[in-house]
Image (tube, rainbow, N blue to C red):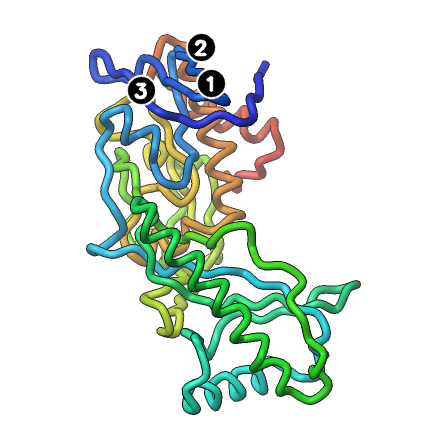
Amino acid sequence: GVDVMFGTDLTGATRRSGNIESVTVSMFGETRSLEAPSFVDATGDAILALHGGAATRYGTDGRAQTGTLGVRYAGIPESAGSAAIHQAITAAQAAGIGPLTSRTGLVVWLPGSGDMVAYLADEDVDVRDAKSLAEAERHARAQAWAYLEVFRSLPGAGNARIVTTGPQLGVRESRHVLTRKELSDDFALSGTQDPAMVAAGAWPAEYHPGAGKPSQWEMIAGPGYYGIPLDALISRDTPNLFAAGRLLDGERKAAASLRVMGTSFATGQAAGVAAAAAAQHNRGSLDLHAVQAELQRQDARLPL
């Protein structure tokens, strides 16, 4: 029952009696208004919440996490090893070669092609600002070429080349929708099992404090995952707005765990089911157990 419309940009929303009533989308120069009893904001940047007058905040503790450009390289043998790569980057930074923001980061070799993907080109960026984003994109791609020169100094990698850079900078954090339940750091890291859970979060708290600064990791205790309750997906001041993905409301470490792709899939599915249930029952009247049962029927595998 879903109509998918590609090539659309959300440009506005109307609010009435504390709820979002409609959204305006632009499609190749034309605009259209769409009404619905409930909405899901999965924009990553809380764009719908912003236009619809729902409460949001930017970043956590006054700043947003670093963004990173993923780059795929060919011709770098896996035998080179990540330790040697990091040592080569450290030497290049000391010699003034650059721009190179990070000496450590995720480096993986892909099966089949043998290409290496590196997440090293860190950027401090405010994605609400087009100028900031453009400068970060340009600088990150300049870094991609600088890292290539470093990699070519490794044994057996003299002919290394860039296969592709990411289509856009990887953004870890932007605006958050303020929800009925903000997930605390302790809630996530202790592996809290909330009986109202509609999704599970299992990624460690992976926080990126700034360009060139090592990421900070904390593992989840207990069973190794925590239960994300339904109220963590519902706007605290706009009852018919549901949130999913990295814009969920969490403290610094909790948000650093919630934001990742696998958890975004889970919260997206949960928000969609909950929004559909709310739409069928006159806005905001939600039966938690019915939502959980439908998610289980869809094979969401909630450990209830």
User: Relative to the observer, which residue lies in front, 88 or 237?
Assistant: 88
Residue drawn 47% across the image and 39% down it: 199
- Circle 3 residues within 10 Å: few <14, some 14–19, many ≥20: many
Count of all numbered marks drawn on residues in the image? 3
Residue underneath mark 1: 276
Task: Check disc 2 and report its element: helix, strand or loop.
Answer: helix
Residue drawn 32% across the image and 53% down it: 132
Earlier sequence position, callout 1 versus callout 3: 3
Amino acid found under the numbered disc labelled 1: Ala
Residue underneath mark 2: 280
Picture quarter with the N terminus: top right
Tell me where residue 220 sits by quadrant: bottom left
Tell me where residue 283 sits by quadrant: top left
Check the image and report above or below for 51 versus 279: below
Residue drawn 41% across the image and 54% down it: 257
User: Relative to the observer, which residue lies in front, 191 or 92?
Assistant: 92
In the rendered image, residue 37, in percent from the top left (x then y), is placed at: 38, 12
Left or right of 224 on screen, residue 190: left
User: Relative to the observer, which residue lies in front, 160 or 199?
Assistant: 160
Amino acid found under the numbered disc labelled 2: Gln
In the rendered image, residue 3, in percent from the top left (x then y), is placed at: 57, 17
Task: Check disc 3 and report its element: helix, strand or loop.
Answer: strand
Residues at discs 2 and 1 in contact (Cβ within 8 Å): yes
Check the image and report above or below for 27 versus 280: below
Q: Nearer the viewer, mark 3 or mark 2?
A: 3
Task: Check disc 1 and report its element: helix, strand or loop.
Answer: helix
Q: How far is disc 3 from disc 2 in space, using C-alphas?
A: 21 Å
Left or right of 79 on screen, residue 289: left
Residue 65, disc: none
Residue 13, disc: 3
